[in-house]
Amino acid sequence: MGRYIVKRLAASLICVVGVSLIIFIAVRLSGDVTQLLLPEDAQKEDFAKLRAELGLDKPIPVQYLIFVREAAKGNFGRSTRFTRPALELVLGRLPATLQLASMAFLIAIVFGLLSGVTSARKRGLPLDLLVRVGALIGQSMPSFWLGLMFILIVAVRFGLLPTSGRGGLSHMIMPAVTLSLFSIAAISRLTRSAMINVLGSEYIKMARLKGCSERRVVWKHALKNAAIPVVTLAGLQLAQVIGYGVIVETVFAWPGIGKLIVDAVFSRDYAVVQAGVTLLSVIYIIINIGVDLLYGVLDPQIRYE
Amino acid sequence: MLLSVEGLKTYCYTKGGVVKAVDGVTFSVNRGEALGIVGESGCGKSMTCSSIVRLVPQPAARIVGGRILFEGEDLIAKDESAMRQIRGNKISMILQDPLMSLNPVYTIGNQVAETFKVHGRRSSRTSITREVVDVLRRVNIPSPEQRLKDYPFQFSGGMRQRTVAAMAIAGEPKLLIADEPTTSLDVTVQDQFLRLLKQMQDQSGMALILVTHDLGIVAETCDRVAVMYAGKIVESGDLQGVFASPAHPYTEALFSALPRLGQRGKRLFQIKGEPPHLLHLPDGCAFWPRCHKVLDRCREDYPPMISIHEGRRAACWRLKGGEA
Amino acid sequence: MAFWILKSAMNKGGRENTIFSQVRELPLAAILLLLPVLICGIFGSLFVPHNPAAVNPDLAMRPPSWMAGEGWTHVFGTDSLGRDVLSRVIAGARATIIVSFLGVVIAGAIGVLLGLVAAYFGGWFDIIIMRIVDIQMSIPGTLLALLISTSLGAGLGTVVAVIAIVFWTQYARVTRGETLSVKQRDFVVMARVLGSPAKRILRRHIFPNIIDSAMVVATLQLGVAVMLEAALSFLGLGVQPPSVAWGKMIAESRLYIATAWWLPVFPGLAIMVTVLGANLLGDWLRDRFDPKLRQV
């Protein structure tokens, strides 16, 4: 198991480096930063001076190395909008995003697994049909639209919940549910098919022959086996949750990193874009390592290889 | 009489029609006795076993008729929770593929212990562990204490099947049903396992139903034998009798098909034709298209079970007082 | 190839006996949903009831006319500038199908090519290409889309590029897996033993065998691509005016959501119908041709 962890960590490190390269390239391609920082009537010399200051006159590979060195120190530059260090700004918003994302993820796993297992057990019956149709529709609704529909019906029509901003549970429910819906659907469908697959296995028959109750058969024997492919999917869904979180935060004005990044894209606040995307990617990579470790826990054959 | 199956009917409802997988099967097993059920693939032997423990794959298949008397009580009349008490406890069953029969994500110790836990036999962890080690030793697994934390993929084929047997006898059942237990094993291991079954019987006085397509296995382990064809039993009786003078043409043909020493140069006998598709059974006796002794009557009516003498029965028109 | 796929609608014997699965034998539902979208996208300009760009301040913010008892003049109502919503919904189909279709095809071309190369030639090709795939997949798709939009600016071309870049990795992974397994098969080994050049083997033996999975991935991704395009348009990074995009329509409706419910609802339904149709089609294809991809 130790070797497995080390291998994964090494691969992740390469990913982090690669991601930094991609982000660096993307931002560099966006255009000349100096155009934004100086007033329109500035002279050529002013531009040149600023470029030298920002290190933009050096060759690109050197710029990259500087970027990496500074990033490792936590310096992603200053936000042009708020004139605070970009990383500080981004970190400040992290708790809000984490709160929303983890709630959404939790909802997705709980309801996805439950509905998938129920659907598999009651295969062919009306409940199964309902869940499957629901999942199909759930995967077809764009999250921003779903969010707006929620706002329309729950907040505007019935005035039950606040429409925006961060606060207690009542503020968090709509965005969390909106964010989770796609994942509930995906997890539900995969759980269902994995469960049906597993429930047809000989060892399940054997468990019944031993006299195990149906509950034991499903929740002890079947689930652990069905969980293995679902865990892979859950990892991918996390990317969705983080990614679409950006949009849901915008719809509900939830003050998280996503909203920050979107605003930064429009106001050409590149430092913030860099810092934000890097941070979120690193978090995603770390969580994926966790997912791989979970594999090891679930599937003994991986551990012993 | 421990188990008496009377006129058991289990039908499968498929898109193409009703498949009478088990169609009026009657047999019995006494305490401590070993009954062999023989037949080709698809003849209904596995479905019969599944029916006895009431684990037919619903909703496609259902037990539609007959009685299964176990220790005097009809198993068909029992509800699911009563059956759960019986499975693993009074009646156990082991399946063909030992690798598939074991859950890959739990340890051997965990899975064998489960039989004890489910039937509430012991309560403390240590006493359960002791019982597990004990039963693993009984099935001849070496150093069982060290094996408890192993996973199924770490065991060899023979050891896995023995583990499955351990899980099955942990509850000290009165009846063990073994559905083709040696088919997936290497030939050398097969022998070991059969001897283990015999040993288990001797130690506990448990009855055994051994389902197989291999007559050689039946010869080694069983006291009585029942031959199945197309969902029905066509012949049954004590081992010596049936083997010495088979009454039903199908049984005869099965024996003729066995290669024998000293037969060199001669072509191996083959039963002509193929087993019938259960959706398209012929009228009359199901075997008549392949029968080398077929009579006109066979094509029209299915022969009833005719008693030859004490314990020996067969379903063939030729037995009704000689010729038809 | 696609024609052949559509033709083969025979009964393959259902896995379950529900009405749902029998309807699934033919992708009827998928076709019913996607066909109108396709028609709108290609021929929409021929049958729009009103000019989608026609600004009409007197007619602004009208609810759907059949609800107000005014007949069928504005079936989906009008927006804040008096433009007919139905016409705009029809017009929006064009951007959606062009972008998603083009994007997915380009992604497929790149991904299949790289996957083939990685698997067939192995060695450094494999290592480098797969590393790139891993690295790119460490950035959540939407974030990557934002990043690319930052670099390239908004517009139709950007969205196509975004979809191509975000989606090629999945093709690469699947194609690589398939190629690896086809590579081992006897007829390929024979061809190599007999001295066939790589290009020929790839073209004749390998490509036809992996193209099925690639097509399944393509249709499964179509739905996701449409949603990504809608999301980008919603954020304002998609096609620019005067082109119409459903996501943009929804974004513009946010201000009026309390009073004009029809403004976000109809474009959103259009998106949903398209994605649902694409998903159903993808599922049907996958169940027919490559159930191994169930986990995609």
Image: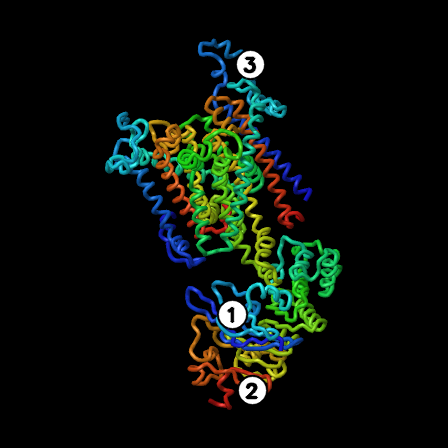
Of A5 and B47, the residue lying toward us: B47
| Foreground disc of the pair 3, 2 | 2
Residue to which mark 3 is pinned: A52
Count neighbours of disc 3 (C-alpha within 10 A) and say few if under 14, some if 14 to 19, many if 20 or more. Answer: few
| Foreground disc of the pair 3, 1 | 1
Report if the CB atoms under discs 2 and 1 are less than 8 Å apart: no
Q: Picture quarter containing residue C13?
A: bottom left
Residue B223 on image: x %, y %: 64, 78
| Foreground disc of the pair 2, 1 | 2
Of C187 and A29, the residue lying toward us: A29
Same chain for labels 2 and 1? Say yes or no.
yes
Mark 3 lies on a secondary structure that is helix
Residue C172 on image: x %, y %: 50, 41
Q: Looking at this view, name the residue that lies furthest to the front.
A: A159
**Residue kind at label 3, given as amino acid type:** Ala
Q: Can residue C241 be seen in the rendering of this structure?
A: yes
Mark 1 lies on a secondary structure that is loop
Mark 2 → mark 1, Cα distance in angstroms: 27 Å
Report if the CB atoms under discs 3 and 1 are less than 8 Å apart: no
**Residue kind at label 2, given as amino acid type:** Ile
Report if the CB atoms under discs 3 and 2 are less than 8 Å apart: no
Mark 2 lies on a secondary structure that is strand
**Residue kind at label 1, given as amino acid type:** Gly
To which chain does the residue with label 1 belong? B
Q: Is residue A140 above or below residue A121?
A: above
Q: Is residue C92 above or below residue B47?
A: above
Q: Which mark is residue A27?
A: none
Residue A230 on image: x %, y %: 55, 46
Q: Can residue B182 be seen in the rendering of this structure?
A: no
Residue to which mark 2 is pinned: B308
